[in-house]
Amino acid sequence: MDKIKPLFTAKATATGGRNGHTASSDGIVQADLSVPKEMGGPGKPNTATPEHLFAAGYAACFGGALDFVAKQQKKDASKAQVTCAVSIGPREGGGFGLAVMMHVENKSLPQSDLAALVKEAHEKICPYSHATRGNVDVRFEVTGK
């Protein structure tokens, strides 16, 4: 496992698990939670799941990694739209697991350039990609011009 030198630490507390509430220590992120109907829960309106929060974080982080890689190559990926879909379901070995489908679109970059930037951001830069590698099936759909 690679060790890091922390530059920033986010802290959040959840109370009540999947049917409770979560908030960051600074109050910026707050979400009421409920288990979706698809998983046998109440699916309360205006509530989130841990998968919503993970998808939002991964999409934002990956967008930043993509922009970083592009700037290093004198390209502009700042307008890329990153949509992250996080699925949860039972694992063959028991318990539950996640799968991720990431759609990256930027019509201002040629398809081949965008695909190369996405690959580099995923393999070398994005900490979410590093954390999921070997643990979560992460797939990409890339749409350039």
Image: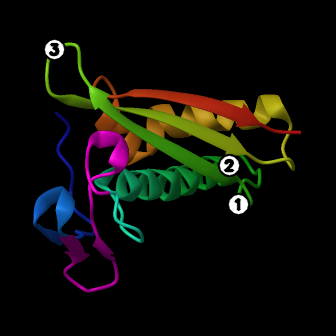
Mark nearer the viewer, 1 or 3: 3
Residue on which disc 3 sits: 93
CB under 8 Å between discs 2 and 3: no
Helix, strand or loop status at disc 2? helix
Helix, strand or loop status at disc 3? loop
Helix, strand or loop status at disc 1? loop
Q: For the view shown, which residue lies furthest in the left direction?
A: 16
Q: Quadrant of the C terminus?
A: top right
Quadrant of the rendered image containing residue 96: top left
**129 or 82: nearer the eye?**
82
Report crowding for label 3: few under 14, some 14 to 19, many 20 or more residues within 10 A (C-alpha). Answer: few
Residue 70 numbered tag: 2
Provide the residue span drawn in magenta: 21-42
Q: Marks 2 and 3, Cα distance to the nearest angstrom?
A: 39 Å
| Residue at image coords 31%, 73% | 31
Task: Tell me if I can see residue 3 in this picture.
Answer: yes
Residue on which disc 1 sits: 78
For marks 1 and 3, the one nearer the N-term is 1
Residue 133 image point, x, y percent: 34, 28
